[in-house]
Image: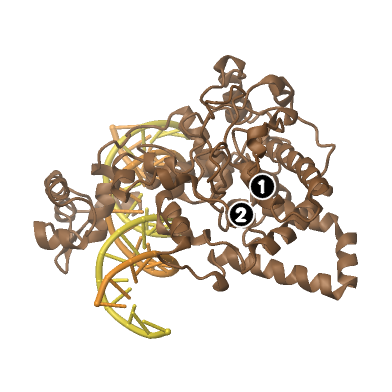
Chain colours: A brown, B orange, C yellow
DNA sequence: AAGGAAGCCAACCGCTCACGT
DNA sequence: CACGTGAGCGGTTGGCTTCCT
C-alpha cells in the first residue's frame, strides 16, 4: 500500500486490520499475543508438526501453514532476535556464494536464525549494494576459487599418475572439498549440507591458506580405503569461491549464478564408503529445537583433534542446486578455453557422444536432483543416503542425493576428464592477493585458527563496506 | 512539521516434494 | 502407479518505521 493510501485509511479499516481479516474461518494478518499464546500452548502439548490440526484442536483461526510459519519464525525457542552480527553476515555472504537463494539451508547453518530473516537481510543488502554499483561478493571469493581449483588440478594429476584409470579420483576430489572424519574407515563421501563455516564464519579472505599446506597429506588421510583428504580453504571448499568468479565473468542466472550446469560433481559419491553422519542423526524435532545443531552436525567441519596439523576432515557438500554453480561455471569457462580439445572429441563421434550423454545425465541431475535410473530405493542401501540428507534439513535437500547414473564410477571417470580439462585451462597467472600470501603459515582451522593471525576485521570491513577494492569488479546485473 | 522515499520485517502465496493410502 | 495430504521452501506483498528533503 502506498503511503498515501495508508494516510487515508479510515478508522474502520484500521480496526479491521488490528483484528485481522477473517476469511472462510481463517484469520490473516498480524498475529496477536493471544494467538501466539494459544499456538505456544498447543505446541507445548502436542509438539511440532501436524499443523493443520492446530485450528481444529485449539480453536485458533489460523491455517496450518500460518501456524507453522509463526512458530518457526517467532515462537520457537532459541531464536535469535535482532541484527545480524558481523560474523553472521559473513556466513551469509559466503553461504550465498555457494548456495544461492537457499535460505533454509543457510538458516540451517546459522543457529537461531530463520530463513525468512536471512532472506530479508540478503534482499535488502543486495538491493543496497546493487544500488551502490557494488558486487555482492568479496574478491577473495574469486581468488579462493582459483586457488582451490589449482590445488585440485595438482591433486588430480597426482592421482592420475598413480592410478591412471582410477574411478575414485573425482570422488576423492570431492572428498577433499569438504570436511569430514578422516580416520573413520567407514566414512562416506556423501553429500550433505556442509557446515563449512560452523560458527566461525568471519574472515573469508583471511583464512586463506597456502596451497602447499592445503595439500599437506597425511598418511592417515590416504589410507587403504582411498579416503584421502587434504586441508582446504576453511572458508569454502569449492564454493565460496565459485560463484563470484563466474557470476561476474560469465553472468547469468539467479543472482548471477550459472544455473543448470551440466556438471554436478557434488552429486557423486564414492559407492564404497559409508555415511559419516550416520552416527549423529538428529531427529527432525531435535534439529529444529536445537536450532540447527542437528543439521549442522551432519557434516560439520570437524577439526580433527587427533591431528595437530589442524586438518579438517572432508565431507562433500550437498549439491548446490541450480544457482550456485561457481565450479560449474568454471568448467564451462574452461570448456570454452579448451575448444581445441573439444574439437578433437567432436572428430571422434564416440567420444563426443559419450561426453554429450554424460553431460545430459549430469544436467538432468542438476535440474531434478536425481537421475531416473537411480530411483530412490526406500529402506535399503540408499536409506543411509536418504537419512543423511534428511539430517541436513529438509526433503528438498535430498534432491541431489542419489548417485548419478547407473554406473557412478563411469560417471566419475568422465567427470575427471572434464575437471582436468577445466583445470588444465584455468588461468594460472591469476595474482594472489596480499592477504593470501600473508596467510601462508596459517593453519586451516576455523575454530582453532588464531584470531591474531587474521587481518584486522576492520580492514575487511572497510574493504567491504567502502568498496575500495570493488571498483575493479564487474557490476552486478 | 509534513510528505515522500527507502528500509525493514512479518506474513502470505504458489509451488514442489515426500509420504501414506 | 495414481492420488491426496502435509510440510517445507522461495518469492512476493504489504504495512510499519525511519530517514531525508
The residue to which callout 2 is attached is: A270
Of marks 2 and 1, which one's residue comes earlier in the chain?
Answer: 1
| Quadrant the N terminus of chain A occupies | bottom left
Question: At x 43% / y 41%, what residue is drawn?
Answer: A296
Could you say which quadrant of the image residue A421 lies in? Answer: bottom right
Using the image as rendered, state which of residue A464 and residue A141 is in the foreground: A141
Question: At x 28% / y 42%, what residue is drawn?
Answer: A289
Where residue A370 appears, as percent x and y from the top left, is 54, 66
Question: At x 22% / y 51%, what residue is drawn?
Answer: A48
In which chain is the residue bearing label 1?
A
What kind of element bears circle 1?
helix
Residue B17 shown left or right of residue A48 in the figure: right
Residue A461 shown left or right of residue A250 in the figure: left
- Mark yes or no: residue A425 visible: no
The residue to which callout 1 is attached is: A172
What kind of element bears circle 2?
loop
Tell me whether the residue at label 2 lies in contact with that at label 1, contact meaning CB atoms closer than 8 angstroms: yes
Where residue A411 appears, as percent x and y from the top left, is 68, 63
Where residue A257 appears, as percent x and y from the top left, is 62, 53
Amino acid at each position: 500500500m502506498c503511503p498515501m493510501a495508508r494516510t487515508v485509511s479510515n478508522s474502520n479499516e484500521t480496526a479491521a486490520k488490528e483484528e485481522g481479516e477473517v476469511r472462510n474461518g481463517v484469520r490473516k494478518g498480524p498475529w496477536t499475543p493471544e494467538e501466539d499464546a494459544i499456538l505456544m500452548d498447543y505446541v507445548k502439548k502436542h509438539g511440532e508438526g501436524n499443523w493443520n490440526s492446530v485450528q481444529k484442536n485449539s480453536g485458533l483461526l489460523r491455517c496450518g501453514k500460518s501456524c507453522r510459519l509463526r512458530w518457526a519464525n517467532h515462537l520457537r525457542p532459541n531464536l535469535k532476535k535482532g541484527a545480524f552480527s558481523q560474523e553472521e553476515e559473513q556466513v551469509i555472504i559466503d553461504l550465498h556464494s555457494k548456495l544461492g537463494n537457499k535460505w533454509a539451508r543457510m538458516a540451517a547453518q546459522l543457529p537461531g536464525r530463520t530463513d525468512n530473516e536471512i532472506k530479508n537481510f540478503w534482499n535488502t543488502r543486495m538491493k543496497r549494494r546493487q544500488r551502490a554499483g557494488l558486487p555482492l561478493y568479496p574478491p577473495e571469493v574469486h581468488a579462493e576459487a582459483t586457488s582451490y581449483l589449482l590445488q585440485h588440478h595438482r591433486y588430480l594429476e597426482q592421482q592420475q599418475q598413480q592410478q591412471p584409470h582410477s574411478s575414485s579420483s573425482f570422488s576423492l576430489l570431492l572428498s577433499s572439498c569438504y570436511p569430514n572424519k578422516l580416520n573413520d574407515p567407514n566414512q562416506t563421501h556423501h553429500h550433505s549440507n556442509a557446515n563449512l563455516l560452523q560458527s566461525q564464519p568471519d574472515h573469508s579472505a583471511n583464512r586463506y591458506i597456502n596451497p602447499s599446506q592445503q595439500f599437506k597429506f597425511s598418511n592417515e588421510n590416504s589410507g587403504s580405503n582411498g579416503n584421502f583428504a587434504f586441508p582446504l580453504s576453511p572458508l569454502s571448499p569449492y564454493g565460496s569461491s565459485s560463484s563470484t568468479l563466474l557470476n561476474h565473468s560469465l553472468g547469468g542466472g539467479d543472482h548471477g549464478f550459472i544455473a543448470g550446469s551440466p556438471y554436478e560433481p557434488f552429486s557423486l559419491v564414492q559407492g564404497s564408503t559409508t555415511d559419516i553422519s550416520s552416527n549423529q542423526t538428529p531427529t527432525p524435532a531435535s534439529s529444529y529445537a536445537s536450532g540447527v545443531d542437528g543439521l549442522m552436525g551432519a557434516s560439520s567441519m570437524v577439526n580433527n583433534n587427533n591431528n595437530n596439523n589442524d586438518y579438517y576432515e572432508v565431507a562433500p557438500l550437498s549439491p548446490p542446486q541450480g544457482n550456485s554453480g561457481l565450479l560449474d561455471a568454471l568448467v564451462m569457462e574452461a570448456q570454452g578455453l579448451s575448444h581445441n580439445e573439444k574439437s578433437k572429441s567432436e572428430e571422434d563421434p564416440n567420444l563426443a557422444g559419450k561426453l554429450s550423454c554424460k553431460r545430459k545425465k549430469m544436467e538432468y541431475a542438476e535440474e531434478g536432483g536425481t537421475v531416473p535410473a537411480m530411483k530412490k530405493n526406500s529402506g535399503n542401501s540408499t536409506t543411509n543416503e536418504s537419512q543423511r540428507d534428511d539430517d541436513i534439513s529438509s526433503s528438498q535437500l535430498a534432491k541431489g542425493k542419489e548417485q548419478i547414473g547407473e554406473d557412478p564410477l563411469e560417471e566419475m571417470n568422465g567427470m575427471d576428464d572434464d575437471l582436468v580439462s577445466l583445470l588444465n585451462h584455468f588461468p594460472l597467472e591469476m595474482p594472489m592477493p596480499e592477504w593470501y600470501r600473508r596467510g601462508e603459515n596459517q593453519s586451516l582451522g576455523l575454530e582453532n585458527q588464531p584470531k591474531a593471525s587474521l587481518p584486522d576485521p576492520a580492514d575487511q570491513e572497510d574493504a567491504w563496506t567502502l568498496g575500495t577494492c570493488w571498483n575493479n569488479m564487474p557490476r552486478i546485473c
